[in-house]
Image (cartoon, rainbow, N blue to C red):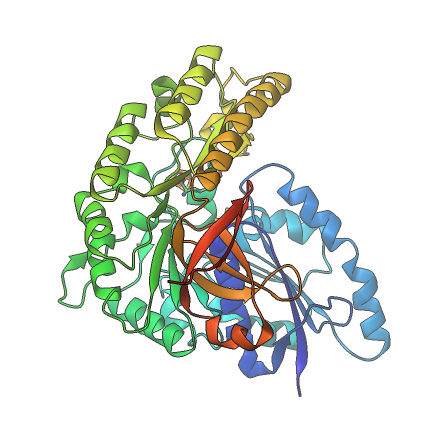
């Protein structure tokens, strides 16, 4: 009998990947994905803990479920409610206390055990709490991915040993773990066989990857890319999120040598001030970051850069903020994410005495975002008149439109007659860029 599975996902791409894999794990039990929470037999909230209010948001979302659960019960059916992901890992006990109607709470490392957890919930009353970091690696226990789009995510590394003083990830995802090259290659081949043409390798610290290679030695990310580039029909490779400390020469060489590796890199810097970077425990300076970018641009001059910034880390002065603004001007970003510092319980920075007032953070964030926006628009506009390979992957925003991605990861739209759509979707096609705004490009198929 088919049952309805409703998953709601917050947070990073790794959570998006995990949600898809959870669906794969429960598919053999008859659960089919559904948009509809109301009549779902299994509801999973896959949560994120990275910034403030995540827990409160979760409880308010959860609040509407007991009524739905009761309605199902009145019909003699059951709604199983599960909280997964990083809030589950960090606040398992709190969820158990405040939302006793939740049937399962499990962290990012145990969802391969979902069938056993579901069996236990069905058999026994009471909540299943599963927030261990099991020794048995989850990836070996997961089934093959059943479906994929043209663009696919593939987690190759999890966890973090870096302990930046503001960040919860080392606590919610656990220690760094890298999958074996063999299992990654086999998952990539399976994705391509199912239609994927672009794969984004994921990891909280993806470039800290150090998996067992095909020859039994330890391979880094650079070496892995050379191997993945051998897979026929896999047109594009990307990766995120990287740490500056792990941007080694082999990875930079991969950007030089591998045409499938797209000229786009998301490399969080967080701040341009060396004293703030030190207090954050980033273990790199602003100039280290500049040197890495110089090296990348030397081998791949068109590489487009993205980053993450935190404003208002404890102790951040006006001069520190100016150093961040200067770094942004020096590098020139194609896009970036910026956040106000958020005090996370249990992290070292939360206990620092010199927290920055909210209004100061607001002003700094506005100033930074204005500069980043300006850079993004000017980067996008610099492509007008150019002809770029665009990989088409989906319908556009309106009828007759197709969506694709430029090499620099921008959403790119073309208008195209219905007859040509099938032919173009999944293909890399040369597109002349006609116009650009902050978040996307518009173009037309280039005729040569
Ligand atoms: N592993 C990645 C990023 C993980 S979290 C890295 O090392 O860069 C994604 C982004 O969220 C971070 O880059 C950071 O900019 C932001 N972030 C993490 N913790 C935060 C906090 N406490 N307050 C504000 N932003 C935070
Ligand atoms: Fe968090 Fe730092 Fe690890 Fe990134 S490197 S996940 S910011 S602790
Ligand atoms: Fe959020 Fe966990 Fe990802 S805290 S950003 S879902 S690793």
Camera-nearest residue between 59 and 228: 228
In this view, which residue lies farthest toward the front? 448
Q: Residue at x 58, y 82 (%)?
A: 29
Camera-nearest residue between 268 and 441: 441
Quadrant that contains the N terminus: bottom right
In this rendering, the answer to whether 299 lies above or below 184 is: above
Camera-nearest residue between 129 and 147: 147
Residue 285 visible from this viewpoint: yes
Q: Residue at x 40, y 24 (%)?
A: 329
Quadrant that contains the C terminus: bottom left
Q: Is residue 147 left or right of residue 292?
A: right
Q: Residue at x 55, y 17 (%)?
A: 356
Q: Is residue 425 left or right of residue 238?
A: right
Camera-nearest residue between 108 and 240: 240
- Image coordinates of residue 260 in percent, x first then y, are 29, 60
Q: Is residue 106 left or right of residue 7?
A: left
Instruction: Please state the total of marks drawn on the protein image.
Output: 0
In this rendering, the answer to whether 321 lies above or below 332 is: above
Residue 138 visible from this viewpoint: no
Rendering quarter of residue 141: bottom left
- Image coordinates of residue 204 in percent, x first then y, are 40, 48
Q: Is residue 355 left or right of residue 399?
A: left
Q: Residue at x 56, y 42 (%)?
A: 437
In this rendering, the answer to whether 271 lies above or below 354 is: below
- Image coordinates of residue 25 in percent, x first then y, are 51, 74
Rendering quarter of residue 2: bottom right
- Image coordinates of residue 157 in percent, x first then y, are 35, 56
């Amino acid at each position: 009998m088919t049952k309805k599975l409703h998953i709601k996902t917050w947070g990073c791409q790794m959570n998006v990947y995990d949600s898809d894999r959870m669906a794969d794990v429960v598919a053999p039990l008859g659960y089919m994905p559904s948009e509809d929470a109301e009549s779902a037999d299994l509801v999973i909230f896959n949560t994120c803990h990275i910034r403030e209010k995540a827990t409160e948001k979760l409880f308010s979302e959860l609040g509407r479920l007991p009524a739905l659960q009761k309605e199902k019960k009145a019909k003699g059916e059951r709604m199983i409610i599960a909280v997964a992901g990083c809030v589950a890992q960090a606040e398992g006990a709190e969820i158990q206390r405040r939302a006793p109607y939740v049937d399962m709470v499990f962290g990012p490392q145990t969802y391969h055990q979902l069938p056993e957890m579901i069996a236990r919930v069905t058999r026994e009353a009471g909540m299943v709490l599963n927030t261990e970091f099991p020794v048995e690696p989850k990836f070996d226990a997961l089934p093959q991915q059943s479906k994929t789009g043209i663009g696919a995510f593939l987690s190759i590394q999890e966890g973090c040993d870096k302990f930046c003083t503001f960040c919860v990830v080392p606590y919610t995802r656990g220690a760094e773990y890298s999958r074996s090259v063999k299992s990654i290659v086999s998952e990539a081949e399976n994705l391509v066989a199912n239609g994927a043409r672009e794969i984004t390798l994921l990891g909280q610290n993806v470039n800290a990857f150090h998996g067992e290679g095909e020859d039994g030695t330890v391979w880094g990310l650079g070496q892995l890319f050379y191997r993945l580039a051998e897979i026929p029909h896999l047109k594009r490779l990307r990766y995120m999120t990287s740490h500056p400390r792990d941007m080694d020469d082999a990875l930079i060489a991969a950007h030089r040598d591998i045409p499938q590796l797209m000229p786009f890199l998301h490399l969080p810097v967080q701040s341009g001030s060396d004293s703030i970077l030190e207090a954050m425990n980033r273990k790199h300076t602003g100039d280290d970051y500049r040197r890495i970018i110089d090296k990348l641009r030397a081998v791949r001059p068109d590489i487009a850069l993205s980053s993450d910034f935190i404003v208002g880390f404890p102790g951040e002065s006006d001069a520190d903020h100016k150093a961040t603004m200067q770094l942004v001007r020096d590098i020139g970003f194609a896009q970036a994410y910026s956040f106000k510092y958020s005090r996370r319980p249990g992290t070292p920075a939360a206990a620092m005495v010199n927290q920055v007032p909210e209004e100061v953070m607001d002003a700094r964030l506005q100033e930074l975002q204005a500069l980043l926006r300006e850079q993004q628009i000017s980067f996008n506009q610099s492509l007008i008149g150019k002809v770029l390979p665009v990989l088409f992957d989906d319908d556009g925003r309106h009828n007759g439109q197709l969506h694709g991605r430029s090499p620099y990861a921008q959403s790119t739209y073309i208008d195209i007659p219905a007859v040509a759509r099938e032919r173009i979707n999944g293909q890399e096609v040369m597109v002349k860029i006609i116009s650009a705004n902050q978040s996307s490009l518009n173009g037309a198929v280039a005729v040569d």
